[in-house]
Amino acid sequence: MKKATTVKEYIKKVPADIREQFITLHELIVQSAPGAESIISYGMPAIKWNGIVVYYANWENHMAIYPMPSAMKAFASSLGGYVTSMSTIQFPHGKTIPKKLIRDIVKFRMEENKIKAENKKRKKGNK
């Protein structure tokens, strides 16, 4: 099967019975990242603003976001009810999406990317 090259194509490939839930996740992430660009990277949707903010994807039994290890550490106390790894949070199909948690993670990552971009600009200006 051909890989999606746009987020719109990716969403169309999500099975119909869970597509609405995935669209909710997608819209939540996009709305939480004003000014960010929706892209496909590593075969998954991602939000990019001064670098990748988060990746997200649909899998057979769950959806997941990939917010980078720094966010996993910062939000560790809020992740107890989810299957996680070093940089992944899984949300089982059919379960309520934790909207506030996702918003907070995306905002945290936006702030990290902002600081990273400012530091890079500052270092470039000092040369």
Image (cartoon, helix red, strand yellow):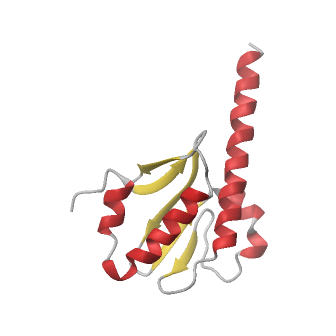
Identify the residue shown where x is 71% and y is 80%. Answer: 80
For the C terminus, give its image quadrant.
top right
Residue, far bottom: 94
- Where residue 66 appears, x then y in whole percent? 56, 61
**Residue 8 quadrant:** bottom left
Residue projecting furthest to the top: 127
Left or right of 14 on screen, residue 115:
right
Q: Which residue is located at x 64 percent, y 67 percent?
A: 102
Horizontal side of 12 relative to 69 (left or right) equals left
Look at the picture and state if 39 lies above or below 18: above
Tell me residue 26's x, y (percent). Answer: 49, 64
Residue 99: give x, y in percent of width and height: 64, 73
Q: Quadrant of residue 82?
A: bottom right
Instruction: In this rendered view, identify the residue nearer to me: 52 or 31.
Output: 31
Q: Residue at x 43, y 81 (%)?
A: 61
Q: Is residue 73 above or below residue 80?
A: above
Say which residue appears at 55% left-offset and 78% top-offset. 91
Count all numbered tags in the image, as a single digit: 0
State the residue in front, 86 or 50.
50
Residue 51 % position (x, y)? 58, 41
Quadrant in which the N terminus appears: bottom left
Question: Image height check: is 26 above or below 109?
Answer: below
